[in-house]
């Protein structure tokens, strides 16, 4: 995933994270492919950066250090997301599943 300024968006890019306005309204869901119409809508919302999914390079290999760094980043995100509910058995299992998924996503790009 990479942040792109709104002016650098081009058709065919894939939104990596849903775009939520200040009032909580979801404008675009993750996984949507950009086209000129969507790009114009985003520009009208006065957004600065959009998180775009980077193309997956299936031939890339990761060093042990890169994998460790990804794991640390995931741990930080997990603590923020689940800070109030880790004591609950079911939420703790959900937390673990999210961590595993985030690691796989990080390795894919």
Image: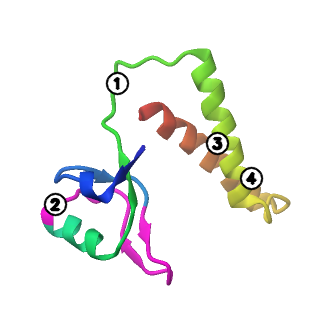
Q: Position of residue 9 (x, y in %)?
A: 24, 53
Label 4 or label 2, whichever comes before in sequence order: 2
- Sequence-wise first label, 1 or 3: 1
| Quarter residue 81 falls in | bottom right
Q: In the image, which is nearer the foreground, mark 1 or mark 4?
A: 4
Give the alpha-carbon distance from disc 2 to disc 3, as whole Å.
31 Å
Q: Which residue is mark 3?
A: 74
Cα distance in 3D space between marks 1 and 3: 21 Å
Q: Is residue 76 above or below residue 6?
A: above
Residue visible at 34% across and 24% down in the picture = 58
- Whether 65 is among the magenta residues is no
Position above or below: 10 against 74 = below
Q: Nearer the viewer, residue 106 or 11?
A: 11
* Residue 48 position in % (x across, y down): 39, 62
User: What SS does tag 3 mark?
Assistant: helix
Q: Is residue 17 left or right of residue 100?
A: left
Read off the residue under disc 1: 58
Q: Which mark is residue 35?
A: 2
* Tag 1–tag 2 contact (CB < 8 Å): no
Where are the magenta residues, as a range?
18-36
């Amino acid at each position: 995933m990479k942040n792109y300024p709104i002016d650098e968006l081009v058709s065919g890019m894939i939104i990596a994270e849903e775009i939520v306005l200040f009032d909580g309204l979801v404008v675009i869901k993750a996984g949507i492919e950009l086209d000129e119409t969507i790009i114009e809508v985003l520009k009208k919302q006065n957004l600065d950066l959009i998180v775009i999914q980077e193309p997956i390079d299936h031939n890339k290999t990761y060093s042990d250090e890169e994998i460790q760094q990804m794991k640390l980043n995931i741990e930080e995100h997990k603590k923020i997301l689940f800070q109030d509910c880790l004591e609950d058995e079911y939420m703790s299992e959900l937390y673990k599943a999210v961590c595993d998924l985030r690691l796989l996503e990080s390795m894919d790009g």
